[in-house]
Image (spheres, rainbow, N blue to C red):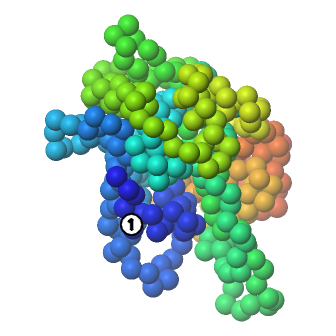
Amino acid sequence: MPLPADLQARLNDPSFWRAYFFEDEGIEDEGEDVQDDEESIVVEFPVGGGYALTLDICVGLHMVNLAMRTPDSPETLELGWDDEAHWHPDALRWAELDLIARAAATLDHTLRHPGPVLALAARFVVLDAGDDLDAITPMMDAAFGPPRAPQVGVDPMAPTLDIDFDRPVPAEPWWPKTRDWLHRADGRHNGVAWRHGDDGVWTVEQDEANNADRDLYSLRCPGGSFPFTAWARLVTAAEATLAAASLPMPENSAEQCWIDEERTSAPRGSLIAARFGPSPLRNSRRYLLDLHLPMEGRPNSYAVAVRTDLDRTLREADRGWAESVGSSSTPGRGLTEVWFSIGIVDSLDAGVALIRQVLRRHDTDSAVRLTRNRELIPLD
């Protein structure tokens, strides 16, 4: 089944990907048809035997639903969903999505792998310590493709003035990156583990004692409402497709690797890892911090200035981001505290050092608190 035309037309549009990954908050509509973005796009990736993985995408409402289709029912079975309210995106093992993408590409040679299946559905993967980034990184890099060329224009997320003082400078459009995807999907450092039961069923669990930066939200935990039996049949159907169908002709080195693996019965991912070498993301990780900023005696604009400076400083250093997540107020006293969520990439110490610099620039109250998993981080 080919990709829907309205989806195919958007796959090269940076604004689509920015919205798809919920990175477009704060961007004002510039006359585009908002109704179009609130309509859903349904895409199916058949794997054989009447089974298919389905995505129901509504970028305007920040909702993506993952389901599966079976040959014996017109209704789909829910696997997970991602939104900004009560998300449950942790539905798939990497090996399963890779298998599905291979089977789909075998049935439809116009559906390249790595390509849309990974780029769109990998948001529903959760990784554990058994996953090999040497085999995963090249596939995700190829699925997303290179960043788009810089364009002269205004970044919709950047503050602007009414008067332009100079010629516009080309800016790199927002584009999904493998590192950002990894930090969403990565459960390796936070107690997430896939378990293969005696009954052959794969479930996912989290050891809360080892979780500091990423909670698990899944229907696939033991006893969950995930359609375990139907899913096992889908996986079996995908394996049967790969065993019987003709493989596509490769168009790039990543495709060549997985096709060679299928032709030679090499373990999946082994040739990818061997030919591409060590992943630069092997040791990459994300730390989540909370900042509580006292506001008594300060105007509301103070919190905006601090948050903006934090976010800009961390992003310019390629060290993370900051966003507002809440506030508290008291009758008669007004706004008393604002809370920020801060993501630090790779080096916690380097990120905290940047946070300290920003807080000093804004002469923050001594009662400001920075924590990770409720543990206080010194700001002296």
Q: Is residue 171 placed above or below 327 in the rendered structure?
A: below
What x and y, as percent, mark residue 379?
79, 43
Q: Which image quadrant is residue 106 in?
A: top left
Q: Is residue 171 visible?
A: yes
Q: Residue at x 71, y 69 (%)?
A: 149
User: Residue at left 68%, top 61%?
Assistant: 147
Nearest the viewer among 296 and 288 is 288
Residue 97 seen from this side: no
Residue furthest out toward the left: 73
Q: On screen, 252 above or below 233?
A: below
User: Which quarter of the rendered picture does the C terminus lie within?
Assistant: top right
Left or right of 246 in this view: 66: left
**Camera-side residue of 345 and 127:** 127
| 10 Å crowding of disc 1: few (<14), some (14-19), many (20+) | few
* Numbered label tally: 1
Q: Residue at x 16, y 39 (%)?
A: 73
Q: Amino acid at mark 1?
A: Ala
- For residue 279, side relative to residue 105 (left or right): right
Tag 1 residue: 5
Residue 288 screen position, x and y as percent: 63, 41
Camera-side residue of 119 and 273:
273
Q: Quadrant of residue 39?
A: bottom left
Q: Secondary structure at mark 1?
A: helix
Residue at the image point whose x is 44% and y is 81% from the top: 32
- Which residue lies most toward the top here? 198
Task: Report x, y in % for residue 2.
Answer: 38, 56
Compared to residue 16, the image places residue 191 above or below, namely above
